[in-house]
Amino acid sequence: MDAELADRLRAAGLDAGAVERLVRTALDEDGPEDVTSTPIFAPDERSTGDFTAREDGVVAGIPVAGVVFDLLGIDAEDKAADGDRVTRGQVLISVSGPTRAVLRAERIALNLLTHLSGVATATRAWADAIGDTKARVRDTRKTLPGLRAVQKYAVRCGGGVNHRMGLSDAALVKDNHIAAAGSVTKAYEAIRAAHPALHVQVECDTLDQVREAVEAGATSLLLDNMDQDTMLEAVRLVDGRAELEASGGLTLDQARDAAVTGVDYLAVGALTHSARVFDIGLDFT
């Protein structure tokens, strides 16, 4: 991979090697030969084209798509940057290279760009909806296998923040942990004894669990499926002793209602598991 491109990926918080492996997997899925393009175009025939937004939104994945072009020997010029608000008809990337290579790159680059830009666009809608509150929209582990890093990157491009990347960088005590351990306190204390410095979040379904978690020493609580009045009471009970995250069944229409309760985060799995693709197309010029 081109060194400058690798540096751009690292600056974005992505593992350049992992992104390259992702792209190579996508190339392998398409097989060794494009049996449509090979008979039509000579090896030395060249084409130019523009990847263009076909709706308004937020773009993400430009350097990720850049890996596709780099591996296939295609020249690419970025016309927008990740996180930019873009409008319908705006050129995002211009490419030039062997026609066979450009056509081979087209679908893979679009799969990455449209999905990641969809995640960023969805995230921006949530971030805008709660922009006048202290709350931030945060993702979850509800990501597609193999795409977690780039999906969470797209969330950042859209103005959101990331929750834990995996099971080893932070603990989240959920209802099944509590049921198996016997109580919130027992589950929390077991993790704290094993990992004294680890960030631990406790999922709470009731105000009684909120009280118990705070008394046990928890400094991060997930308020699961609570209505607005219950969240308001949880904020009052905690009184700044722990960060609070609203979770469960939130919709964009309800975003501000949840945020104004005083919680610090809104957990939105739909940012990654249900984002609509953002419409982008490649047109030869």
Image (spheres, rainbow, N blue to C red):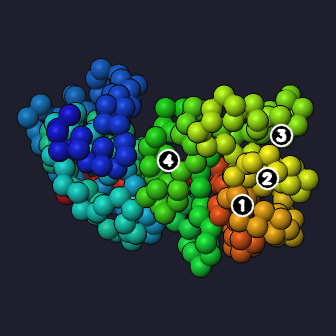
Q: How many residues crowd around disc 3 within 10 Å: few (fewer than 14), some, or many (20 or more)?
A: some
Q: Nearer the viewer, residue 146 or 260?
A: 260
Q: Earlier in the sequence, mark 3 or mark 2?
A: 3
Q: Earlier in the sequence, mark 4 or mark 2?
A: 4
Residue type at the position of mark 3: Thr
Q: Nearer the viewer, residue 171 or 274?
A: 171
Q: Earlier in the sequence, mark 2 or mark 1?
A: 2
Q: CA distance from mark 3 to mark 4?
A: 31 Å
- Identify which residue is drawn at 86% across, 49% down: 212
Quarter of the rendering occupied by the N terminus: top left
Q: CA distance from mark 4 to mark 2?
A: 29 Å
What residue sits right under mark 2 in the picture?
214
What residue sits right under mark 1 in the picture?
241
Quarter location, residue 105: top left
CB atoms at circles 2 and 1 under 8 Å apart? Answer: yes
What residue sits right under mark 3 in the picture?
185
Of the numbered discs in the image, which one, if any, rests on residue 152? 4
Residue mark closest to the camera, 3 vs 4: 3
Residue type at the position of mark 2: Val
Residue type at the position of mark 4: Lys
Looking at the image, is 199 positioned above or below residue 43?
Answer: below
Residue type at the position of mark 1: Arg
